[in-house]
Amino acid sequence: MIDRPEELEEFTPYLMNRIIARYNKGVESALKEAGVSVAQMRALAVLTEGGPCTIGELSVLTVIKQSTLSRTLDTMERAGLILRQAQDGDSRYRMISLTPEGQAAYEAAWPAMLGMRDTMLKALSPQEQEELNRMLLSIFYDIRHHDF
């Protein structure tokens, strides 16, 4: 149990959550200029990196609840950023893929993501940044529940 409020800042999950909340708030403003939301950018990034996938896979990789992601994808599909195509004639199983417009939106928005990352990590040397990434990946692979 935490006895003093200052100990909360030493509780790693709390600190990580606060860092990411501040990062997301900053990137939200930057992405607005590119015309995409944070959730849309997560989807664009995953689809750019990994190619077409199902909503279940995309939900895990974007860390967005499937119901929320479905509404995001509806908006993205109306904007022409993605395609959702039924597989093997089964409309319940649909693959989501980027359109050329979606790829262009990703390329327009990605510099904002890089800029916010650099702002977030500017207190660390390049070597410290690499070490932080290695440590976070170790934690991630140790606690993940999916193969991706």
Image: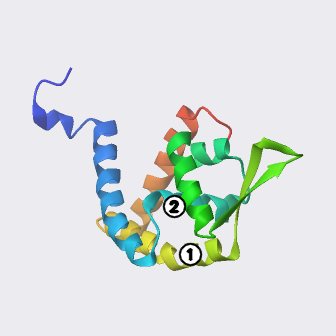
- Residue at coordinates 59% horizontally, 42% vertically from top-left? 60
Query: Which mark is drawn over residue 105?
Result: 1
How many neighbours does mark 1 have within 10 angstroms: few (below 14), some (14-19), or many (20 or more)?
A: some
Position of the C terminus, as image quadrant, is top right
Identify whether 79 is placed above or below 20: below
Q: Are marks 1 and 2 in contact (CB under 8 Å)?
A: yes
Lateral position of residue 2 relative to residue 138, left or right: left
User: Label 2's element?
Assistant: helix
Query: Which mark is drawn over residue 87?
Result: none
Q: Please tell me which residue lies in front, 127 or 97.
A: 97
Identify whether 84 is placed above or below 106: above
Identify whether 1 is placed above or below 129: above
- Residue at coordinates 51% horizontally, 73% vertically from top-left? 110
Colour pattern of the rendering: rainbow
- Answer with the quarter of the image where residue 82 lies: bottom right
Q: Could one spot residue 62 in this view of the protein?
A: no
Q: Position of residue 41 (x, y in %)?
A: 51, 63
Q: Which residue is mark 2?
A: 40
